[in-house]
Every structure is written in structure tokens, then in C-alpha cells.
């Protein structure tokens, strides 16, 4: 297996684990931070990069012990990432509901202020 593929998988595992740890520690606060979109984009780009690397290598080269270990570790990390994405999705939905509520309250306050101006 090429060093490029091993390095790519190792980097992905490291980056994904950092993301998993961050979401696990901060929960919904990750959603509220301005960097959430950037971090999700980084995860997406890394997934695409590893997919290209895997497609470019023959399956037989992935059976070497070191390669097999790294791929197994990558699969386990992807499972953990999928679970975190579910948690993150729930947090995003909760944040959307909160923002919808704030928007509704702002509209009501705006309508009230407009009606008060009309009668004043």
C-alpha cells in the first residue's frame, strides 16, 4: 500500500476523531459556533479525498497488515462519526426550532410595534 494512502487514512482518522471529540464535548454549542460549517466542510473534503485514494489502489494492496489495520480503524472511526452526525443533526434541528421561535416572536413584536405606531 502506498504511503499516500496510509497517510491519507491516518490524517482522516485524526481529523475525524478531533471532530468527534469536539462534538461530544460541546454538543449543541458546536452548532452555535461560526466554525461549524467550516468544520463540516473539512470532514466532507477529507471523506472525498480518502474515497479517491481508496479507488486508486488495488484491493490486494489493502490486505497488507498495516493497511488492513488502518482501514479497520478508519471504518470504526466512520461509525463513530456517523453517530456524532446523528447527534449533530438533532442539535441542528433543535437550533432551527429555537431560531424559528425567535423569528416568530420578532414578527409578533414588529407587528405590535407597527400597530402601536398607527394608533399613536
Image (cartoon, rainbow, N blue to C red):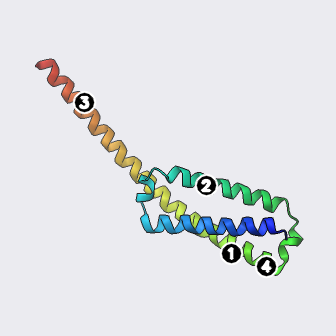
Which residue is at 79% across, 79% downward? Answer: 66
Looking at the rendered structure, which numbered label has been put on residue 73? 1
Q: Are marks 3 and 2 in contact (CB under 8 Å)?
A: no
**Nearer the N terminus, badge 3 or badge 2?**
2
Closer to viewer: mark 3 or mark 4: 4
* Quarter assignment of residue 58: bottom right
Q: Residues within 10 Å of mark 1 (few under 14, many from 20)?
A: some
**Nearer the N terminus, badge 2 or badge 1?**
2
Residue at numbered disc 3: 110
Looking at the rendered structure, which numbered label has been put on residue 120? none
Q: Residues within 10 Å of mark 4 (few under 14, many from 20)?
A: few
Q: Are marks 2 and 1 in contact (CB under 8 Å)?
A: no
Closer to viewer: mark 3 or mark 2: 2
Residue at numbered disc 2: 42
Decide if residue 9 is on the left or right side of residue 112.
Answer: right
Quarter of the image with the N terminus is: bottom right
Label 2, label 1: how far apart the Cα atoms are: 19 Å
Q: Residues within 10 Å of mark 3 (few under 14, many from 20)?
A: few
Decide if residue 45 is on the left or right side of residue 68.
Answer: left
Residue at numbered disc 4: 66
Label 1, label 3: how far apart the Cα atoms are: 54 Å
Question: Element under label 3?
Answer: helix
Quarter of the image with the C terminus is: top left
- Residue 44 position, x and y percent, is 64, 54
Question: Element under label 4?
Answer: helix
Q: Residues within 10 Å of mark 2 (few under 14, many from 20)?
A: some
Q: Nearer the viewer, residue 82 or 48?
A: 48
- Residue 108 position, x and y percent, is 25, 33
**Nearer the N terminus, badge 1 or badge 3?**
1
Amino acid at each position: 500500500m502506498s504511503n499516500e494512502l496510509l497517510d491519507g487514512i491516518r490524517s482522516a482518522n485524526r481529523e475525524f476523531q478531533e471532530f468527534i471529540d469536539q462534538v461530544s464535548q460541546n454538543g449543541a454549542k458546536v452548532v452555535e459556533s461560526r466554525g461549524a460549517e467550516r468544520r463540516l466542510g473539512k470532514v466532507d473534503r477529507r471523506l472525498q479525498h480518502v474515497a479517491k485514494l481508496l479507488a486508486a489502489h488495488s484491493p490486494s494492496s489493502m490486505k497488507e497488515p498495516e493497511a488492513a489495520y488502518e482501514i479497520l480503524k478508519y471504518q470504526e472511526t466512520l461509525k463513530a462519526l456517523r453517530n456524532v452526525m446523528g447527534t449533530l443533526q438533532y442539535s441542528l434541528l433543535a437550533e432551527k426550532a429555537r431560531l424559528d421561535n425567535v423569528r416568530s416572536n420578532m414578527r409578533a413584536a414588529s407587528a405590535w410595534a407597527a400597530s402601536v405606531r398607527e394608533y399613536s
